[in-house]
Image: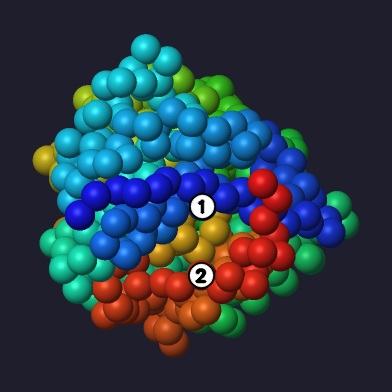
Amino acid sequence: MKIKKVEAMVLTCKLDKPIMDATYTLPQRSVVLVRVDTDEGISGIGEAAYFGGPPMITKMIIEKELANYIVGEDPMNIERLWETMYQRSIKHGRKGAIIASMSGIDIALWDIKAKAVGMPLYRLLGGCHEKIRAYASAGFYAEGKGLKELAGEMASYVKEGFTAVKMKIGRVSQAEDVARVAAVRKAIGPNIDLLVDGNNVYTSYEAIKMARKMEEYDIFWFEEPVPAEDVEGSAKVAHAIDMPLAAGENEFTRYGFRDLIINQALDIAQPDTTWCGGITEARKIAAMASAWNIICVPHSFSSAIALASNLHFSASIPNSLLQEFDRNYNPLREELLKEPVRINKEGYIDLWDRPGLGVELDQSVVKKYRVD
């Protein structure tokens, strides 16, 4: 079997009302999908994160650079292809758009491999879990969203069946955010896990101060309180607070996570298969984390392909715990697949038995939102 073609597709959906976290305003939802075709008629689908720049740049990297390294090669040799892409782009790679672009190709290659052997991807990768507990990732800032609206939103996810929910903090004053956290805790009750995400906005001192103010609301974890580059600051916060510190969604490859782990800068690792180097690299990150008894909970805030990829990864490793499930309005998640991903009545996502990623794109939806 040989790789015949590598294609990247950019899809975009504008939002009626922008959503905001501590640092970003999102007026639209976009995705870069990656399709790899082989000469034996088996194709794989993946997704490459584009966060922080125009998605067309990611498409260009995939089609104009990385594709040249792998077309004509055997798609089953995934480790070799990963190293080829990494080493040939290393002078201007190592992190950022190159690694994210590699991620999309890598996921598609694993989809091909699992389809070729007729197995669901999570089983090919090791098959540790049949289901993963999901947390509703939402609670963004938005125009007109006050305490009542935020509380109602988060309570609605509990009614859907989620047993854990995550909200954003860091865009307003600490006093205002504590009030928001208090309102959400009251709305969801004492038995639902409440996670908070600072999106890298605090100094270490501010993060410690905020964590102590939130302690009475039984916070399940405090996510990315300080800038991703501030490994020492993250370690300082992790040692000072009485709640787990989650981090890593902004890191690339095992090397970035090695530094976080060695410096004791996190309690929960959050690689994203569309961002960190694909499933190939995410597996190495999870294995490294397990050596320090660190839980691995993938970040996933994009399309249905990102969710499916990270689910298969989560289900394949022993040190998984939860799976992020974005609940903000996003047709590229809800409409993109012929069979959308859903939680069961216990708040878990059941893995499926279909080969590969086990998902099929709705081509009418692809056509509707495709902009490249």
Residue 89 point in image, percent of width and height: 36, 21
Q: Nearer the viewer, residue 206 or 33?
A: 33
Q: Residue at x 72, y 57 (%)?
A: 13
Name the residue beneath numbered marker 2. 361
Residue 242 point in image, percent of width and height: 38, 42
Q: Nearer the viewer, residue 299 or 77?
A: 77
Residue 299 point in image, percent of width and height: 44, 50
Q: Residue at x 64, y 69 (%)?
A: 365
Residue sitting farthest toward the right? 144
User: Is the Cβ of the residue at disc 2 closer than 8 Å to that at disc 1?
Assistant: yes
Pick the quarter of the image with the N terminus: bottom left
Left or right of 254 in this view: 207: right
> In the rendered image of this protein, does residue 182 appear above or below residue 200?
below
Q: Residue at x 34, y 49 (%)?
A: 4
> In the rendered image of this protein, does residue 281 appear above or below residue 323?
above
Left or right of 10 in this view: 314: left
Of the residues under marks 2 and 1, which one precedes in the sequence?
A: 1
Q: Which mark is residue 296?
A: none
> In the rendered image of this protein, does residue 299 appear above or below residue 328?
above
What amino acid does circle 1 point to?
A: Leu
